[in-house]
Structure formats: C-alpha cells, structure tokens
Image (tube, grey):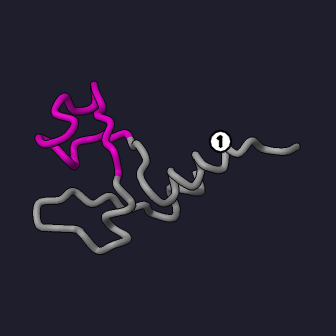
C-alpha cells in the first residue's frame, strides 16, 4: 500500500522539527500541569533547537526512556 507524500512530510516534521506531547503527573508542577492528576498540559517539543545545541538555562528538556517506547 503506497503512502501519500503528505504522510512522509508529517513523519519527517515530527521526527526532526517539532512534536506535541502531553505532560502528566506532578514532576513539572507548578510550571506545567498545575492541576495535578486531574489535568494535563500539552507542550510543543522543539527538536530543531536540541539538534543544534541551542539549549539554554531555564529551558525545559524532555527525555524519552526506552522502556516507555515498549509499552
């Protein structure tokens, strides 16, 4: 089954430029998810800045644990 060019562009964008992620839990309170377990925030993760080493003091950095990808 052939995929449309838009599909490949979207995958490339999400892998290399930016993607959205949901913040859950209390680890980032009070900056993100101030409502605790009753709510969640959505953030835009900028892959481009990290790839170019443009991370500065005060920036929020998101890491993915490999075991989370298996679930």
How far across and down, in percent of the image, does residue 41 sit? 28, 34
**Relative to 56, 44 lies left or right:** right
| Residue farthest toward the front in the current orientation of the protein | 5
- Region rendered in magenta: 22-45
| Residue farthest toward the top in the current orientation of the protein | 38
Q: Residue at coordinates 88% horizontally, 43% vertically from top-left?
A: 1
**Relative to 25, 20 lies left or right:** right
How far across and down, in percent of the image, does residue 62 sit? 32, 58
> Dot 1: what SS?
helix
For disc 1, the marked residue is 6
How far across and down, in percent of the image, does residue 36 sit? 22, 32
Q: Residue at coordinates 43% horizontally, 60% vertically from top-left?
A: 64
**Relative to 22, residue 58 above or below:** below
**Relative to 2, residue 54 above or below:** below
- Residue 70 falls in image quadrant: bottom right
| Residue farthest toward the right in the current orientation of the protein | 1
- Residue 12 falls in image quadrant: bottom right
């Amino acid at each position: 089954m052939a995929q449309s060019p838009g599909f490949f562009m979207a995958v490339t964008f999400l892998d290399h430029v930016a993607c959205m992620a949901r913040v859950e839990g209390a680890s980032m309170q009070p900056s993100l998810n101030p409502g605790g377990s009753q709510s969640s925030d959505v953030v835009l993760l900028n892959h481009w800045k990290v790839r170019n080493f443009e991370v500065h003091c005060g920036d929020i950095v998101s890491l993915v644990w490999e075991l989370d990808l298996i679930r």
